[in-house]
Amino acid sequence: MTRGIFIRASLVMAGLSLAGCVTTTTPQQAADLFDCAALNQAVASAANGFKDIKGRFTDTRLTRSWETDVQAFHNACVITSAQRPDHYVCFGRLQVEDPRGALAAGSEALGQCLGSEWTGTPGDDRVVFSRADTDAVVTLETFINDRGRRMGALSVFQRAADAMPLADEEKRAQ
């Protein structure tokens, strides 16, 4: 448990120093960003391919998706698969005081939701959370949308390999 707290503190401090500001997320702010119970339900459902939280199915030429009542972030969550196996994903605006600290604040809140057993590994505009006793991983990514707003994508993947950036995503990041 102490190791998890140390790793989370290191992650938060690294994110804050990268962001160039100091941000503190209180448990209330964490609850404002994410629905922790819904997130934990999505994580638990990853083990069975999200079968217990899949709703109405939609199939298009590019993607398959299922509606879900499990809404962990901005009531904008679905289960989808396109270039990756089925995964749970949510999109929403990260409304924090300092947009430069959005990933740091979001990952701190996400860590509070997931608990001390989870460890976060930061990357460019992305944090990947994992836990020793589960194959599931949780990611939080930030990006600027076409209106100049700082957005977040919260995802739950069945396996760590599923969460790896795709080749075209790596090219865009360079």
Image (spheres, rainbow, N blue to C red):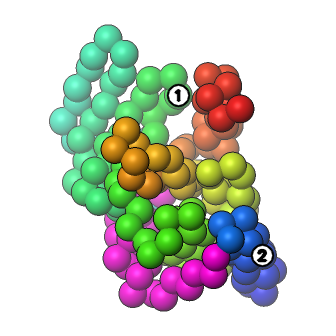
Closer to the camera in the image, 12 or 75: 12
Residue neighbourhood size for the residue with mark 2, other residues' Cα within 10 Å, grouped as few (<14), some (14–19), many (≥20): some
- The percent coordinates of residue 7 (x first, y second) are 77, 74
Closer to the camera in the image, 96 or 30: 96
| Residue positioned 71% across, 52% down in the render | 123
Identify the image quadrant of the C terminus: top right
- The percent coordinates of residue 135 (x first, y second) are 64, 50
Q: Is residue 157 left or right of residue 5?
A: left
Identify the mark at residue 44; answer none if there is no mark.
none
Q: Is residue 15 visible?
A: no
Q: Quadrant of residue 167?
A: top right
In terms of secondary structure, what is the magenta stretch mainly? helix
Tag nearer the camera, 2 or 1 = 2
Identify the mark at residue 84; answer none if there is no mark.
1
Name the residue type under label 1: Arg
Mark 2 or 1, nearer chain start? 2
Residue span colored magenta: 21-43
Q: CA distance from mark 2 to mark 1?
A: 30 Å
Q: Is residue 147 visible?
A: yes
> Residue 66: within the magenta?
no
The local secondary structure at tag 1 comes to loop
- The percent coordinates of residue 26 (x first, y second) are 48, 88
